[in-house]
Image: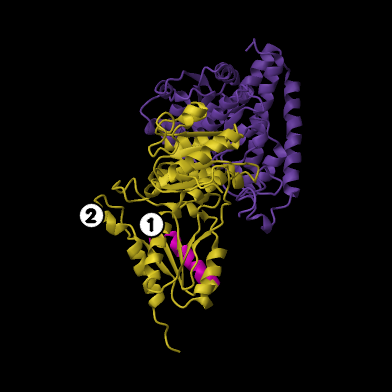
Chain colours: A yellow, B purple
């Protein structure tokens, strides 16, 4: 294992670059990804290496961008198409939900759809209500899609490589507040299997399930709570569809407490599904209701003064974990 | 017309008769409550799919519409697997999971009928992108109705195809109605083809009741695409003889019986047969042979479909994903 450090952006970029080097059927298309390299730099330098035929600047046409990927995938290529902000999936939802996700099933299995859709989610940049959402629950609700949301550079590279190698439509969701994150990343190509969670921090008192930026906030909360003698096990599912519930349930059976954290609004969020499944599969092991931490039920506000209250942070997560752990058991 | 070889003339005729017989049979089965779900029949529009697809190879791609049986038949679709799919049987093209509105044959380059109006065009753009990327001279055709040119997906697809200079032909089947509403109530232009210029592609109007006109217009458009000269569009003026869905044709509230009668006088198959006889390509007896042979094929396909099993319950979750859901 090399000691090389790489940023979250370049970890993504390296996965794409290595896939394009290995397979001439891999190409990228999206708004501003060519000469400009993408608004977050995630596609930087790729057009210079692979040319404009393989790193394609498209019109601002999200439906056609996804359709381009579907049509190319179903006829034998391995496309990566970019939707600049996750909010823009709404513009392309017919192609994502009614077409990409269902083609294989509707066609009786004959279709192969090796399509990766990349996008960027997350608040914290004062980008306001149309450039800040975390809409992963919308996608996880759709049979046929796989959904990935990495929390660090090493996972980003390995998971992105797996997305590209997948024969299913897969959505890789970058988090905008993690773009500056750096970490140790192996230089050689590698994959991390989809649907396998990672225990970021082992612990014995409470299972904390958190992904993307919230996984890092949960780790910070765990450090804070450790000082008070609360030992958190932090699990990052990494892939949200399929969701590695086995790892979560096994952990809850040991810790007897669970808290789910996400940046998306709490109501109808993926945390509700995770909490429900924990209660179905580990009810007798729970000493308290499963806690859920998420954004309040409002659009993402613009002003930094409001946005800081909107997105859960380490202290809010710590408070939520305390509430779950400290809840007294009823006598008898 | 006289320039077309006898072989091409007979091919065009046969494709149209195949569509007509398949659709009439499907309509009868629907009336007998033997087909579940919605049925959008292509009867009246046969010249369009036939004239277009006669210009295509198996490895050329098409995307279709909710009224898609005709496109698959014209691309060479197998009656037996089509009929079985319409009945929801496990031997159908989609193993009974897609039905009429999702019928497809990827081996024939038919990328699916589509239940969402306009949604096929962006997918055709993707197929055309792949065609160009591979550089094997393949082309893609997007079939869509007049109504689909009012939805965003069509405009995004048309613009992107032109911006990327892709080998694609956009074929608008203007049957004058978007479901139950007249075209002139939903767009302020008379000819859909006016839209082509807005994207920088040539467009022509062709008589959608004349298979030779469609064949010749497509021949030019496909040649252009294969040459690498980019997209073009054809507006085929046509008409559906039956209702938006189902088999009723007369007594409908949104169009008069007289209007239907006028269009039926221009039946694309019968009018073509008159011309074939006039030209001496075939005689009436030979034409009848085409019909009777294909009627046998249809009867055999219906029997095959009726004898086929429904999918077992264990197929419910099969093919949601490729490979194991890890």
Read off the magenta span: A265-281
Q: Position of residue B190 (x, y in %)?
A: 40, 24
Mark 1, secondary structure of its residue = strand
Above or below, A330 relative to B292: below
B102 or B200, nearer to the observer: B200
Q: Which residue is mark 2?
A: A305
Q: Position of residue B24 (x, y in %)?
A: 64, 37
Asked if disc 2 and disc 1 are in contact, CB closer than 8 Å, the reply is: no
Density class for disc 2 (Cα within 10 Å; few <14, some 14-19, many ≥20) is: few
Q: Which residue is mark 1?
A: A263
Above or below, A93 relative to B133: below
On the picture, is B267 further left or further right than A97?
right
Circle nearer the N terminus (2, 1): 1
Is disc 2 in the same subunit as disc 1?
yes
User: Magenta segment, principal secondary structure?
Assistant: helix
Per the image, is A279 magenta? yes
Pick out the residue farthest to the top: B3
Q: Position of residue A169 (x, y in %)?
A: 55, 45
Label of residue A96 in the image: none
Pick out the residue farthest to the bottom: A332
Q: Chain of mark 1?
A: A
Q: How many marks?
A: 2
Quarter of the image for the C terminus of chain A: give it. Answer: bottom left
């Amino acid at each position: 294992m090399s000691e090389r450090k790489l940023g979250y952006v370049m970890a993504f970029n390296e996965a794409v670059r290595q896939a394009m080097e290995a397979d001439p059927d891999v190409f990228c298309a999206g708004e501003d990804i060519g000469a400009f390299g993408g608004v977050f730099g995630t596609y930087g330098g790729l057009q210079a290496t692979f040319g404009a035929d393989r790193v394609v600047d498209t019109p601002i046409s999200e439906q056609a961008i996804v359709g381009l990927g579907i049509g190319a995938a179903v006829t034998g290529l391995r496309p990566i198409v970019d939707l600049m902000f996750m909010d823009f999936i709404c513009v392309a939802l017919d192609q994502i939900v009614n077409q990409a996700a269902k083609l294989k099933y509707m066609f009786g299995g004959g279709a192969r759809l090796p399509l990766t859709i990349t996008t960027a989610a997350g608040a914290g940049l004062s980008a306001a209500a149309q450039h800040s959402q975390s809409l992963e629950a919308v996608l996880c609700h759709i049979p046929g899609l796989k959904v990935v949301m990495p929390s660090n550079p090493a996972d980003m590279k390995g998971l992105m490589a797996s997305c590209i190698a997948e024969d299913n439509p897969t959505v890789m969701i970058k988090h905008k507040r993690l773009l500056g994150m750096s970490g140790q990343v192996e230089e050689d190509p590698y994959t991390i299997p989809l649907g396998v969670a990672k225990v970021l921090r082992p612990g014995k008192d409470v299972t904390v399930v958190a992904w993307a930026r919230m996984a890092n906030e949960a780790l910070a909360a765990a450090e804070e709570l450790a000082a008070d003698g609360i030992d958190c096990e932090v699990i990052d599912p990494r892939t949200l569809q399929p969701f590695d519930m086995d790892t979560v349930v096994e952990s809850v059976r040991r810790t007897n407490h669970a808290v789910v954290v996400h940046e998306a609004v709490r109501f109808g969020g993926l945390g509700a599904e995770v909490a429900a499944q924990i209660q179905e599969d580990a009810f007798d092991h729970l000493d308290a209701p499963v806690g859920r931490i998420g954004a309040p039920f409002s659009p993402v506000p613009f002003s930094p003064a409001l946005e800081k209250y909107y997105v859960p942070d380490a202290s809010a997560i710590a408070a939520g974990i305390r509430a779950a752990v400290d809840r007294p058991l009823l006598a008898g | 017309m006289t320039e077309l070889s006898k072989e091409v003339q007979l091919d065009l005729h046969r494709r149209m008769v195949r569509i007509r017989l398949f659709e009439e049979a499907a309509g009868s089965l629907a009336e007998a409550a033997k087909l579940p779900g919605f049925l959008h029949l292509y009867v009246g529009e046969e010249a369009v799919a036939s004239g277009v697809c006669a210009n295509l190879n198996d490895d050329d791609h098409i995307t279709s519409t909710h009224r898609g049986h005709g496109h698959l038949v014209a691309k060479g679709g197998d009656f037996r697997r089509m009929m079985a799919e319409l009945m929801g049987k496990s031997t159908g093209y989609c193993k009974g999971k897609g039905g009429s509105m999702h019928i497809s044959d990827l081996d024939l380059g038919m990328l699916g009928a589509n239940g969402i109006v306009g949604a096929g065009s962006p997918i055709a753009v993707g197929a055309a992108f792949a065609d160009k990327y591979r550089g094997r001279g393949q082309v893609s055709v997007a079939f869509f109705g007049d109504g689909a040119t009012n939805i965003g997906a069509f405009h995004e697809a048309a613009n992107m195809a032109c911006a990327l200079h892709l080998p694609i032909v956009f074929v608008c089947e203007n049957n004058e109605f978007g479901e139950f509403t007249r075209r002139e109530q939903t767009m302020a232009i008379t000819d859909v083809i006016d839209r082509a210029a807005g994207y920088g592609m040539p467009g022509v109007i062709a008589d959608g009741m004349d298979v030779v006109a469609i064949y010749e217009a497509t021949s030019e458009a496909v040649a252009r695409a294969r040459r690498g000269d980019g997209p073009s569009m054809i507006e085929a003026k046509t008409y559906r003889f039956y209702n938006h869905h189902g088999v009723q044709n007369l007594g409908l509230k949104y169009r008069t019986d007289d209007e239907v009668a006028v269009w039926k006088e221009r039946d694309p198959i019968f009018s073509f047969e008159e011309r074939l006889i006039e030209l001496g390509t075939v005689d009436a007896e030979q034409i009848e042979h085409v019909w009777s042979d294909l009627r046998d094929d249809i009867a055999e396909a219906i029997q095959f479909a009726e004898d086929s099993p429904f999918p077992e319950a264990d197929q419910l979750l099969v093919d949601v994903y490729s490979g194991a859901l890890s």
